[in-house]
Image: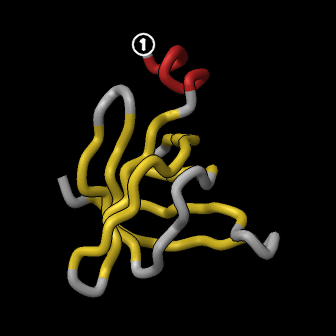
Amino acid sequence: MMSRIDAQWVDEAGKSRVSRRKLEDLSESGLGIRVNDPIRVGMKLVVRWREENIPGTVVQCRQIGQNYLLGIKRDAAQETESK
């Protein structure tokens, strides 16, 4: 897939963060994105892709080389809206 996205979240210090990165994978239940810095499991974020805002929760974060691959589960409300 490899599309550009913006990921937005609030870090542990309460600071709003945005990262422009790559969408690796997309499904009805979640998505995978590649980022520069790790984002802890359980963190809420919003992924902006094309005209869509996809809210979700980080369920996996693993290092691949110098980047991190995040597994994000879509919020239940978003799953219902997209069907």
- Res 23 visible: yes
Residue 4 visible in rendering: no
Residue at 32%, 52% in the rendered image: 32
Determine whether 38 is above or below 52 in the image. below
Say which quarter of the image contains residue 27: top left
Coloring basis for residues? secondary structure
**Is residue 15 rendered to the left or right of residue 82?**
right
Q: Please, which residue is most extreme toward the left here?
A: 1
Q: Is residue 6 above or below residue 18?
A: above
Would you say 36 lies left or right of 55 here?
left
Q: How many marks?
A: 1
Graded by Cα atoms within 10 Å as few (under 14), some (14 to 19) or many (20 or more), the crowding at tag 1 reads few
Q: Position of residue 36 (x, y in %)?
A: 41, 80
Q: Residue at x 60, y 22 (%)?
A: 77
Q: Quadrant of residue 40?
A: bottom right
Examine the rendered structure and indicate whether residue 59 appears above or below residue 18.
above
Residue 40 appears left or right of 21: right
Q: Which residue is disc 1 drawn over?
A: 83
Considering the image in quadrants, where does the C terminus appear? top left
Residue found 35% across the figure and 59% down from its top: 33
Residue type highlighted by circle 1: Lys
